[in-house]
Image (cartoon, helix red, strand yellow):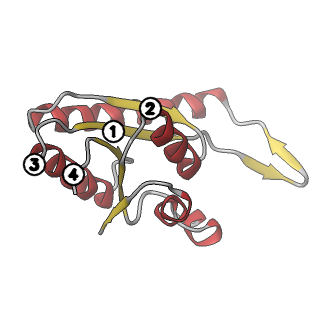
Amino acid sequence: MLFNKILAAYDGSKAANKALDKAIELCKSTPEAKLEVLHVYDFPRFYVAEGFAPVPTSMNKDFYELAERTAEEAKSRLVAAGLEPKVEMDQGAPAETILEYAQKYGADLIVIGSRGLGGIREFVLGSVSHNVVQHAHIPVLVVK
């Protein structure tokens, strides 16, 4: 089965690095295949009672700068692999954003790491990869 538009979700984690390696390998095995990498970031929210506490602007700036560095890291890896460095950043809930982007991009495969940088949220809400697998309308390759 050949895939022509591959979307790799990348957050800089160990599993995401393995997933990106696999996506690069798949792209190279099919000359006409295109690979796009998506890094999804979100700003922290602090719940206090029944509302949100304001987050300092400097903290949001730090999260955005980290997201930019992560996207640049992915670009460097694509260039080193001899591929066009198509890397996008998008802000939002990771699983939903990945699925929306895959539909917008017209992807026919999503490649994602089995565990990202989600921390404790992974146990409370379910992992990003699990949510992507459960709700995707295209094949999803989960890399361990």
Q: Which of labels 4 and 1 is toward the front? A: 4
Instruction: Find out whether the residues at labels 2 and 1 contact each other: C-beta distance under 8 Å.
Output: no
- Is residue 46 left or right of 80 when viewed as pictured? right
Task: First in sequence, mark 2 or 1: give its number.
Answer: 1
Q: Residues within 10 Å of mark 4 (few under 14, many from 20)?
A: few
Q: Which of labels 3 and 2 is toward the front? A: 3
Q: Secondary structure at mark 3?
A: helix
**Picture residue at 59% right of the left edge, 32% below the top:** 60
Q: Which of labels 2 and 1 is toward the front? A: 1
Instruction: Find out whether the residues at labels 4 and 3 contact each other: C-beta distance under 8 Å.
Output: no
Task: First in sequence, mark 4 or 3: give its number.
Answer: 4
Q: What residue does disc 2 label?
A: 89
Give the image quarter of residue 58: top right
Q: Which of labels 3 and 1 is toward the front? A: 3
- Picture coordinates of residue 4 (x, y %)? 26, 41
- Is residue 35 left or right of 119 when viewed as pictured? left
Instruction: Find out whether the residues at labels 3 and 2 contact each other: C-beta distance under 8 Å.
Output: no
Task: First in sequence, mark 4 or 1: give its number.
Answer: 4
Q: Is residue 84 above or below residue 19?
A: above
Q: What residue does disc 4 label?
A: 2
Q: Nearer the viewer, residue 143 or 31?
A: 31
Q: What residue does disc 3 label?
A: 29
Q: Which of labels 2 and 4 is toward the front? A: 4
**Picture residue at 14% right of the left edge, 51% below the top:** 25
- In the image, which disc is placed on residue 24? none
Q: Is residue 98 above or below residue 54?
A: below
Task: First in sequence, mark 3 or 2: give its number.
Answer: 3
